[in-house]
Image: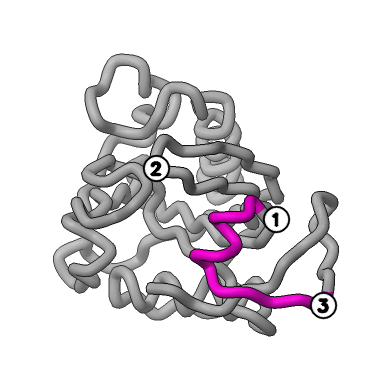
Amino acid sequence: MDELIDILTSEGKPTGKTALKSEVHKNGWFHATVHVWLYTVDKKIVLQKRALTKKVFPGLWDISVAGHIGAGETVLSSAKREVFEEIGLKLNEKDLIKIGTRIHQVTHKNGIQDNEHHHVFIAQLKVPISELKIQEEEVAAIKLFELSTLKNTKNLENVLLSRFHSYYCIVYNEIEKKLQSKN
């Protein structure tokens, strides 16, 4: 979907300008996204299989939920909206634990230039995965994987991308800390 998004500086500050996502990706302008990683108390991680129609990483098992922050939208409202749109899960702001912001810069073979500030959250999945409803235009499937998958991506085919292994390890460590603090 070609939505209107805010253009940022390379430091992540608003420029006051907006553009369609397609134009932002064509020109390589910085913009903001949300990543929400859902985990369970029994050390599982929810991954989504990206729809085959996606322009970037089609068919890849990836982040539980990710999406662009709409123009004028707050980070938290975007995270809640994306989770509900993609997998039908309603979260409250208190459910979302921000673990950081990372700069992501990749030029894809199809010409898309992703210069993004990812606002990264973790949240506990408190309902059975069978109760989630996927948005088929964005998501082909969702599945629970062992949490350790985040650290062992090199051994799995079409699950996450090994070049982002250090990022996945940060997410793994933050989830582990959260799980240990509940004991």
- Point out the stretch of residues depicted in magenta: 16-28
Cα separation, mark 3 vs mark 1, equals 12 Å
Task: Tell which tag, 2 or 1, sits nearer the viewer.
Answer: 2
Colour mode?
A: one colour
> Which amino acid lies under the numbered mark 1 shown in the image of this protein?
Phe
Cα separation, mark 2 vs mark 3, equals 28 Å
Judge by depth and name the residue closer to the eye, 113 or 49.
Answer: 113
The residue pinned by badge 3 equals: 16
Residue 54, percent from left and from top: 29, 55
Q: Is residue 80 above or below residue 100?
A: below
Residue 21, percent from left and from top: 53, 67
Residue 83, percent from left and from top: 41, 70
Task: Tell which tag, 2 or 3, sits nearer the viewer.
Answer: 2
N-term mark: 2 or 1: 1
User: How dense is the environment of label 1, judged by Cα within 10 Å: few (below 14), some, or many (20 and up)?
Assistant: many
Q: Residue furthest top?
A: 155
> Which amino acid lies under the numbered mark 3 shown in the image of this protein?
Gly
**Residue at horizontal 47 percent and vertical 79 percent from the top:** 81
Cα separation, mark 2 vs mark 1, equals 18 Å
The numbered dot on residue 110 is 2
The residue pinned by badge 1 equals: 30
Q: Is residue 160 above or below residue 99?
A: above
User: How dense is the environment of label 2, judged by Cα within 10 Å: few (below 14), some, or many (20 and up)?
Assistant: few
Residue 126, percent from left and from top: 35, 66
The reply to whether callout 2 and callout 3 are in contact (CB within 8 Å) is: no
